[in-house]
Amino acid sequence: MRITGPGLSSTRDIRLFISFREAMADVQRIDLLDPAEVARFGGIEIVAQEVVEGFLSGIHRSPFRGFSVEFTEHRAYQPGDELRYLDWKILARADRLFVKQFEQETNLRAMILVDASRSMAWRGAPTRLTKRAYADRLAAALALILLRQRDATGLITFDEIVREVVPARVKAGQWARLVRGLVDTPDGRGTAAQAALVRLTSLLARRGLVVLVSDLLFDRELALRALHYLRHRGHQVIVLHLMDPAEAELAGPPEVRYRDPESAASVVVRPRELARAYQATVRREIDAWRTACRRHGIAYHHILTDMPFGLALRLLA
Amino acid sequence: MTFLHPLALVGLAAAAIPALLHLLERRVPPEVEFPPLRYLSEAERQNARRLKLRHLLLLILRTALIVLIVLAAARPLFPTPASGGSPHEPTALAVILDNSPSSGLVVDGRPALERLKAMARGSLARASASDRLWLVLADGVARAGTPEALLATVDSAAVSARRLDLTAAVRAATQLVGAEPLPAREVHVVSDLQRTALGPGRAGLPRGVRVLALAPPSQAPANRGVGAARVTDGAAAVSIVGTPGTGAAGGAAPVTLRIRGREVGRALAVPGSTVSITLPPLGPGWWVGDAVLDADELRADDTRLLVWRVAAPARVAALSTAGGGRFVAAALAVLEEGHRVQGGGTDVAIGDRPEAGALVSVVLPPAEPALIGQANRALAARGGRWRFASAGTPGPIAGSALPAIAGLQVTRRYRIEAGTGDARRGTGDDATVLATVNGQPWLVRDGNVLLLGSRLDTAWTALPAAPAFVPFVDALVNRLARGEALISEVEGVPRVEFRTSGADTIGAIVYGLDPQESDLTPAPPALVHDVLGAEVLDGAAFAAARFAGAGRRDGSGLLLMLALVFALMELGVATGTR
């Protein structure tokens, strides 16, 4: 494998990358490994790049098809190619298997919105990534895929306010800028995200793809109103709802005081006796988000932070 | 409700444990960051009422669970009407097993004692280690012991020769159990409840003591027995006793008199009568015979021993100075006429001083006080150790050697005193002092001299005017003068014991049954209740009523079942309502 890519300028990064590849020599699909294990071998760039490599080698096609593609040539069919790209006329005429290949054009503008609030900096177990770390790596991988398709990709990080804005570009070095934007955004405090989302709408003047990566721990109606506005403006909106597995199921000591890291509010509960009710509440909340998004034409995906990046990207394909 | 182990109730304090744990657990809960607090708050808000109800229910169930377990450990006893095999609270119990001779009555081929023993065993077998137990048999002794020891005593109990005074036995037993600081106190009277077994007075129950009496058979069994047999004037007087009014069985029955196993006479007698059977001519000496009735269901009273002495009438000489004067002379004349004495003899001389020619001298005080010294010197000259002293105070005669004259008044007398160094002074049954007045010797045997403190004259004593005077003179010259003691009759296993003095046989003790034992008439329940204060119950009722006053059912099993139900409910609430 060629050792290249943004972020591998230093000797240390290259050495880390080599050791990572060696460690992953026996693994064909590193994008399907445990995110925490993968993250242990390097920074965002290395992880995202490897995840994308594995992801793309697995699906053998562009995950984001349909955004301005033109036919270029035929090539011989290989196992794993999708049958819908099979050229049935050649098959009928010459009894040979050819698939059609398309040239991707870059007229898509994608903007990835990453929630950097305080709640995103939480993880339920030391062996897992924080929601923010997971979101950064997922956003970086997604941006790399989009950039490889020659789609202009940008980044906005926010908590109570907009923290970093990297305008959507397709030029060289854009991915490095995006990664830097992610790295340079510190963990925020509160999450009055709906206000930030409203402000974001003004930054997204041209139609395109908007991907929101967040734990969605803010007022649902207000947030949906902003997302609906984006949708109304012609954007294609995808919401990636991140959740730590410990947030989906309540567990812990017999009695514990849970404190909200953002609001400092706290409540004393007995996890064992409230677990079932809590689980039902979380399920209702997810269903409410999914239903509301569907109603507004917004794609919604619920992602746990122990889900391999490849599977998370697959949800977007 | 009472408890077998009340100390275990201290554990009720543990009922506070669930509440305390709840409070202690709530005091310092660990604090954890948790971003989706809004979900948690929402879940808690929606389940607040259910959780409160669950907490309250769990608290109640856990507290009740501990309370039930502690109460079960304390072994609660609930009052129950039926005794069954249920345990009872600690009881002081005295079982009176009447194994008197009447219990040897054979009923349906079995001694009545077996039935009584079975009932007594039933009472003792139900006793527990926390009970205090006594067993009273016919000897009247209250034996304390463990159930096992007393059961062994019951098993080994045989028909006794002693009569049991039930009134006295119940009185003693109730006082024993009444003194015990136990919750329940009972006396079980296992007896044939003869009417004659009820002694004088009432038992007088202490408060809180319950007396149960086994009811006797409704019909009095027929019985006859030899109540007494004595030899007087060459004939045996045999008294027949038994259960009165028992129809044909209570009619006349043959009485056989046997001497040394040989039948010497026979007569017919009915219960309540006395027959006289003439003895054949017998040589001098002590004779033992027995009066025998035909065998019936109560064998123990069908025979009675009798003992007597055959001796020639004493030859008596009454001196002219005899203190009795005409009274003594008249008595001797009567006795001589009845061939009890012979006149002019030298066996016994009655006078104011010892007679040198007589074997035994009966010395009366001289009428003149001035002659007392002379009489004393004459006594001393015969080697006597007793002498007349100053005048004594009037008083009644007392002494077991001459029961017939006991109580007769003595108005004038001399005190009789022993010489210095004589240690044989005494009263009552003392062989030397035969009768006393005001505790001072009045009739004394001193070797071959009999000293009387009063002259046998109505100016000195009421004795000569009493019907007992002639028998007294008879005993004086025929028995006391010879040093003989009374033939006494004592309750016990039938036998004869002779009393000896040196080489001479001077008396005998005849052991036999109390004649009251022959009357098997049962006491009416009302009388038993009145005298003993007892509930008279038949066998089944008696068995059911034992410990019934203290009858308790152990509630620990029920409480443990309840605790199990509560534990299952707690498990269900704790796991099913999460």
Image (cartoon, coloured by chain):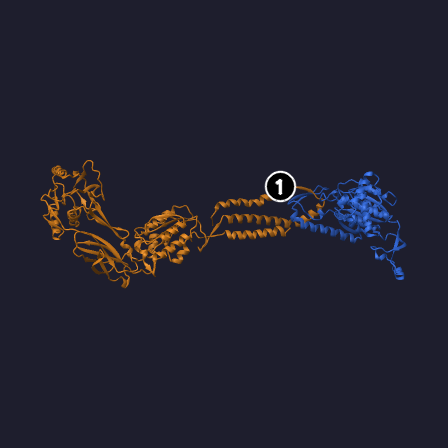
List x then y, in percent, for residue A271. 66, 47
* A8 vs A45, nearest the viewer: A8
Q: Residue B294 vs residue B313: left or right?
A: right
Q: Residue furthest right?
A: A72
Query: Is residue A183 positioned above or below B79 on the image?
Result: above
* Chain identifier, blue in the render: A
* B75 vs B514, nearest the viewer: B514
Q: Secondary structure at mark 1?
A: helix
* B85 vs A92, nearest the viewer: A92
Quadrant position of residue B518? bottom left
Q: Residue B79 vs residue B319: left or right?
A: right
Q: Residue furthest top?
A: B420
List x then y, in percent, for residue B57. 59, 50
Residue highlighted by disc 1: B27
List x then y, in percent, for residue B96. 36, 52
Quadrant position of residue B266? bottom left
Crowdedness of circle 1 by 10 Å Cα count: few (<14), some, many (20+)?
few
Query: Is residue B203 visible in the rendered structure shown here?
Result: no
Query: Is residue B277 positioned above or below B93 on the image?
Result: below
Q: Residue A192 vs residue B179: left or right?
A: right
Amino acid type for the residue under numbered disc 1: Arg
Q: Residue B574 vs residue B229: left or right?
A: right
* Chain identifier, orange in the render: B
Tally of numbered tags: 1
Q: Chain of mark 1?
A: B
List x then y, in percent, for residue B535. 37, 54
Query: Is residue A16 visible in the rendered structure shown here?
Result: yes
